[in-house]
């Protein structure tokens, strides 16, 4: 049987044609996006219901989930390299659904945080497994293209999630139903993975669960210059996104006094990122991951400087925030997929463990950055825009060192789009 044109010779067959495969990967990735974004409009209600006095403490409902999401990736990767992708992704989606129900019935803040931490652990499997499954089936620029298309579909989640959360809360009068919606979504992903997805890990690539084997794989990932550099750059960009997500509800409530506009502006920013991901999927095959992502990182830094100048001068309005934040988010759509693909290039034969190590590092470092930005909220957008500016310069420095001072160089020959 000939290999479909989208896949390289020797690549795995996921049992799905190209478009359904992308949609399933996007759906699995969306579990994490929904787990964060759908409850942002409900944070004040959750705080009131569970007697959380300090508004900044509500951010922990988001960040504790991200913490679980980060640390658990070190576990899911080796498990997926040993048992295979399908059983792990199916079981973790089912676990996500169960823990969503537990969180939905939480009567105290500590219990909610515990459920959220465990829910993040379950969602972490989707982060590791999606990258591993895509790497099993695609490589290089085609992998970046698939990840961009999946991200484009995935971004329907943050575009719609705040509005869905707000609608559920208005319709039911309770934030608890938001978690029940997450349970239904997780259950649907478990069924789809269990019934439609084939195992993509070749038998000869299965690895033992010995500590020495896992440690050897982790050391190899840590020694790959490209892997380390672009993983660290990804951590910085992810931290910027988390900083925005953790503080944006307070920006619209405390600064702009316009909570009803929050889902609309948030959707605008996420929509810009979705458009960018689609554009990336069309141009990355021609120009390459390095040229596209490195152009985007300079644009991101310039936009962050401009936004910081507006915020620091006291000229920030809902309009300036919406326009500049959407423009900045547009850059993220060309950073994440390409940085991730380049980080995976030298470690494709241990994709599960490599993805888990990279994902855990990216998420945990990103969470620390996001917490620092979010907890610095002072009633203005200065901490957020200052954080973006610092991170922009950090990404440029990291990529410059990773590429040994040579930017915008092609790495693979162009492929047909």
Image (cartoon, rainbow, N blue to C red):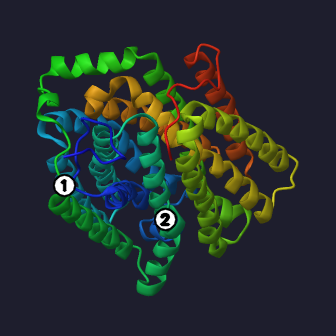
Give the side of residue 168 with respect to residue 72, left or right.
right
Taking the view exactly as shown, the residue that stands out farthest to the bottom is 171
Residue 96 vertical placement versus 67 (above, below)? below
Q: Residue at x 31, y 51 (%)?
A: 123
Task: Determine crowd level at label 2: few under 14, some 14-19, many 20+ residues with C-alpha closer than 10 A.
Answer: some
Which one is earlier in the sequence, the residue at label 1 or at label 2? 1
Q: Can the viewer see residue 246 in this picture?
A: no
Residue denoted by label 1: 90
Task: Please provide percent x and percent y for residue 411.
Answer: 52, 25
| Alpha-carbon span between mark 1 and mark 2 | 22 Å
Task: Please provide percent x and percent y for residue 1.
Answer: 18, 46
Residue 7 vertical placement versus 78 (above, below)? below
Q: Tell me, for residue 144, which label it has, or none.
A: none
Q: Can the viewer see residue 256 in this picture?
A: yes
Residue denoted by label 2: 156
> Between residues 45 and 198, which one lies in front from this camera angle?
198
Task: Please provide percent x and percent y for residue 329.
Answer: 63, 51
Q: Residue at x 47, y 21 (%)?
A: 226
Give the side of residue 405 with respect to residue 345, left or right.
right
Tell me where residue 10 sits by quadrant: top left
Task: Please provide percent x and percent y for residue 364.
Answer: 43, 35
Q: Secondary structure at mark 1?
A: helix
Give the side of residue 381 with respect to residue 283, left or right.
right
């Amino acid at each position: 049987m000939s290999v479909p044109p989208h896949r390289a010779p020797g690549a795995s067959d996921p049992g799905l044609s190209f478009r359904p495969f992308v949609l399933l990967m996007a759906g699995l990735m969306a579990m994490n996006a929904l787990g964060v974004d759908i409850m942002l409009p409900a944070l004040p209600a959750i705080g009131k219901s569970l007697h959380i006095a300090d508004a900044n403490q509500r951010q922990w409902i988001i960040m504790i989930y991200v913490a679980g999401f980060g640390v658990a990736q070190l576990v899911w990767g080796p498990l997926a390299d040993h048992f295979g992708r399908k059983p792990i992704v199916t079981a973790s989606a089912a676990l996500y659904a169960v823990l969503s129900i537990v969180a939905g019935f939480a009567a105290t803040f500590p219990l909610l945080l515990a459920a959220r931490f465990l829910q993040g652990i379950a969602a972490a499997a989707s982060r590791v497994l999606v990258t591993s499954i895509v790497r099993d089936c695609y490589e290089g620029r085609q992998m970046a293209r698939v990840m961009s298309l999946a991200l484009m579909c995935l971004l329907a989640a943050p575009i719609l999630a705040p509005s869905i959360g707000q609608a559920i809360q208005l319709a039911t009068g309770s934030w608890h139903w938001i978690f029940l919606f997450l349970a239904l979504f997780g259950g649907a992903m478990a069924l789809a993975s269990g019934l439609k997805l084939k195992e993509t890990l070749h038998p000869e690539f299965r690895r033992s669960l010995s500590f020495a084997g896992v440690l050897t794989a982790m050391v190899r990932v840590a020694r790959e210059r490209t892997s380390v550099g672009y993983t660290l750059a990804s951590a910085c960009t992810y931290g910027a996104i988390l900083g925005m997500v953790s503080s944006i509800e307070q920006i619209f409530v405390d600064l702009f006094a316009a909570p009803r506009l929050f889902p609309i502006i948030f959707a605008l920013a996420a929509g810009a990122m979705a458009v960018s991901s689609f554009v990336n999927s069309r141009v990355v095959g021609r120009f390459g991951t390095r040229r596209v992502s490195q152009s985007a990182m300079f644009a991101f830094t310039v936009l962050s400087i401009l936004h910081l100048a507006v915020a620091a001068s006291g000229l920030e309005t809902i309009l300036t925030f919406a326009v500049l934040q959407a423009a900045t988010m547009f850059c993220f759509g060309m950073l994440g997929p390409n940085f991730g693909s380049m980080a995976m290039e030298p470690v494709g034969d241990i994709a599960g463990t490599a993805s888990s190590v990279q994902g855990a590092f990216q998420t945990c470092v990103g969470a620390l950055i996001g917490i620092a930005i979010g907890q610095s909220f002072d009633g203005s957008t200065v901490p957020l825009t200052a954080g973006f500016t610092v991170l922009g310069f950090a990404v440029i420095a990291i990529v410059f060192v990773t590429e040994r001072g040579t930017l915008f160089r092609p790495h693979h020959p162009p492929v047909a789009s």
